[in-house]
Amino acid sequence: MSDRRPGISWAPAILLGRAVRVAARLRKRGGGSAVPGLVVNRVAPRFLGSMLSSFPDGLVVVSGSAGKSTTTKMLVTILEAHGKRVFTNPSTANISQGLTSALLERADLTGRVDADIAVLEMDEGHGALLGPQFEARSVLLTNVMTDQIDRFHDSEKVLGMLRRIAERAGESLILNGDDALVAKLAPTGDDGPRAEYFGVTDEVLALLPKGLGYAETMSARHDGGTMVTALSGRTASIAFDGAVHEVTLPARGVHYAVDAAGALASAKDLLGPEFEPATAVAAVSAMPAVFGRGEVVTVRGKRIEFVLVQNPTSFQLNVDELEPGLDQVLVAMGSDVRDPSYFWPVDATRIGRARIVAGSKADDIALQLSYQGIEVDEIIEDLPTALDRFLALPEPERGVKTIVFTADSMRRTRAHLGLSR
């Protein structure tokens, strides 16, 4: 579905996008990263679809409610370890203007990107809208969860979006076999893409009192595929290619183990005979956390762990993995949370004590924490002030300084602390 017909040149669009990028960065240092894509999508609406269809080894799309960023990064890491040149997008650039901006960064004036294959994380809604513009070699679908109330609150709505993305897969669908809604997207005929599955064993599921957090977990378990067979801290046992492999995860939690299983299943499918299990395991095991997701950074001489929460399920899964007894936790909720009440079902008692609660929705999250018996020392709505106060606190008696934040607060935190994207 490429628009690379004779006489079509994307040079004007690329030059325009680069000019807009320079102007945006002059206006706001480090900002405006999506603006070039927004402009180019308006003046050259076929640019994105053409570029996505131009890679020699095809396009791989990763989508779903949660786990997209980590799964994409893991898959890219594995493919690169096998010698593939991969084009990918930053996890914050998973909507149409972000994807276009990422392409503008790498494309030459002929509209070519020096890469063998593209592996792109796509937001469910934007991916569904973009579907008619691209053909994917493979699509990996992570899960369906109850998302933000103002976005994709209805799981059937999300399923419909993922179906439109799945329909673009030419060769394969890599599906979470534990998610009953994702399983509905498996091909039923012999002429469609093949299906490969990943997930956890019954034994692992039985050890999760709160489950996997999907909108609907499979009651009849699938057989085979790439399976998480055991989990301890940041070490997961994952079975594939007839053996069980020990994989070090970038952060604690079963959701990261499932992300690794999905990435391994996809890499095995894409690489075929070239796939080397030892190379793949070593690549994932050496991978740092995707920013904000269990990432540990050093700022002003202080070690800080970032814990991103984006919906009730991710809030629950990530808070459950916090080290017990932490005495220095900052919780920040920003403007991205339109209705904070949808976080109320989350049991956040593992936090224990919040030294500071911050952000534009600080009062709301502080009220929830207080009702759950969590001690809240201080409420500071201004996030930069709260961060400076938090960093100035003495070293914690247990663990490291920990910041639990929503996406808007994550972006503002990183900008204030001078951390690159």
Image: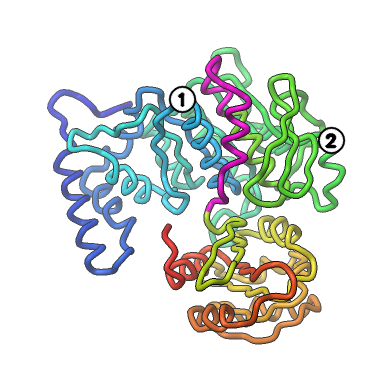
Q: CA gap, disc 1 to disc 2?
A: 31 Å
Along the horizontal axis of the image, is 290 left or right of 253? left
Of residues 224 and 235, which is closer to you in this image?
Answer: 235
Magenta stretch prevailing secondary structure: helix
Q: Residues within 10 Å of mark 2 (few under 14, many from 20)?
A: few
Magenta stretch contains residue 270: yes
Q: Residue at x 82, y 31 (%)?
A: 220
Q: Is residue 220 above or below residue 91?
A: above
User: What kind of element bears circle 1?
Assistant: strand
Q: Position of residue 103 (x, y in %)?
A: 31, 42
Q: Is residue 247 visible?
A: yes
Quarter-of-image position of residue 263: top right
Q: Position of residue 275 (x, y in %)?
A: 56, 21
Disc assigned to residue 202: 2
Quarter-of-image position of residue 281: top right
User: What kind of element bears circle 2?
Assistant: helix
Q: Position of residue 173 (x, y in %)?
A: 57, 27
Along the horizontal axis of the image, is 334 left or right of 316? left
Q: Residue at x 29, y 41 (%)?
A: 106
Please identify the quadrant where the N terminus is shown.
Answer: top left
